[in-house]
Amino acid sequence: MSMKEAGTKPDMTRERTGKGSLLVISGYSGVGKGTVIAALMKEHPEYVFSVSATTRAPRPGEVDGREYFFLSKETFASWLSEDRFLEHTTYLDRSYGTPRDYVESRRNEGRHVILDIEVEGALNVKKACPEAKLIYIIPPDAASLVQRLTGRGTETEEQIRGRLQRAVDETAVIPSYDYVVVNRIVQDTANEIHLLATGESGSRLPKEEGLSLAGQIRDDLREYLKKYDEHAIISRNVSQDKENSMIHPSYSELMTKINNGGDEKDPVVKSRYSIVMGTAKRARQMVDNGYMEQEDHARKPLSIAVEELDEGRIRILSNQEYQQMLAEKAAEKAAKTAEEPAEEAAPAETVPEQTEEVAEAEQPAEEQDA
């Protein structure tokens, strides 16, 4: 199929009047952009996904004009000189671009054209087409984004770290977008984007509130990354231990063991990330309390923490158990305060909400005295 045929083929399924919108949709990696776009297009046939041009060769099963417009490097350069791209980029000696003619022809048919591109390309589209509506999708919180990325099980921890760092960096560009949309429920998000595209309604979340939430997510992700890096340092120390060069059992094995017999719909551990952070925290606790200095340990603290978790000497609390533990501690503190002579009231202690935590282990006598 040629580009001209793909760009001008009329849609006879419904009568169309007026020009369609141009939507540029971006979001953190793992936020669910693809799922939202698929739901939007399934519900509303007037939407069409933009077809990009590329200089890379077609893969088996790919069709010119469907997945991409496959161009030679010479043709791509010619189109570029003729200003036929709304935006373009080159990566690993392969060029990609959004053809202006294709987008405009579909919009003239009354179709709403969707571009799923990264922030740099999105801003270039806005320059070339000021009426384009830029929509940035964010998760409801940092924890759900981390859980989604780690739960897929398709990437290494280092790759996940890279995606989280990119999310932190991209947050600085979100103010340049027209709308910030929170993806809590896919269909609700798709419906909201449809209303924005047609001008029937504004965003459910005012932009300033959306930017504030994005800033909070950025800060929380930085904390996740800080913990990850602390864990990585401890892990490197473990790998240098000749007698214990690998973590055993693995985090995946621990995750299966901990969740065995639990609620499949609401498992105690929803991703390996919780175990990584939990054991790293326990290892840090042993170091800070001087336990490693009191005992002649041949192994590193992270190996000991993994062993403790595997043997049940420490465990990961569910959200309900964690909240109950906080309530009990608060009650004990209140009772103790009531028994003491009245003194000037101190500010109430607040504890941030937490979904998963590692309980303190039963310490050896030496550590309790530390």
Image (spheres, helix red, strand yellow):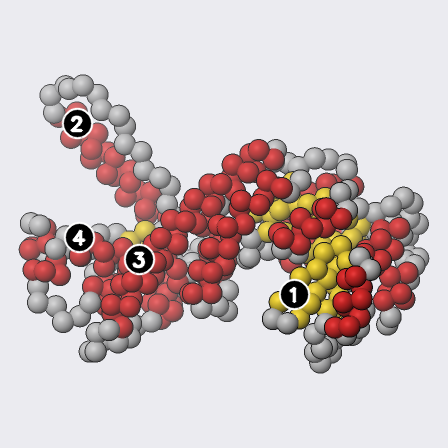
Q: CA distance from mark 2 to mark 4?
A: 28 Å
Q: CA distance from mark 4 to mark 1?
A: 49 Å
Q: Nearer the viewer, mark 2 or mark 1?
A: 1
Q: Secondary structure at mark 4?
A: helix
Q: Nearer the viewer, mark 2 or mark 4?
A: 4
Which of 141 and 186 lies nearest the eye of the viewer?
Answer: 141
In this rendering, would 109 be left or right of 188? right
Pick whichever of labels 2 and 3 is earlier in the sequence.
Answer: 3
Going 47% across and 65% down the picture, which residue do you hit? 159
Are discs 4 and 1 less than 8 Å apart at CB?
no
Which of 50 and 362 lies nearest the eye of the viewer?
Answer: 50
Going 23% across and 56% down the picture, which residue do you hit? 284
The quadrant the N terminus occupies is bottom right
Taking the image as drawn, is residue 39 in sight? no
Instruction: Give the numbered dot on residue 264.
Output: none
Question: Label 3 is placed on what type of residue?
Answer: Glu
Pick whichever of labels 1 and 3 is earlier in the sequence.
Answer: 1
Instruction: Give the numbered dot on residue 337.
Output: 2
Return the residue at label 1.
90
Residue 187 horizontal/vertical position (percent): 66, 49
Q: CA distance from mark 1 to mark 3?
A: 35 Å
Q: Secondary structure at mark 3?
A: helix
Going 20% across and 78% down the picture, which residue do you hit? 243
Return the residue at label 4.
288
Q: Secondary structure at mark 2?
A: helix
Which of 265 and 236 lies nearest the eye of the viewer?
Answer: 236
Q: Nearer the viewer, mark 1 or mark 3?
A: 1
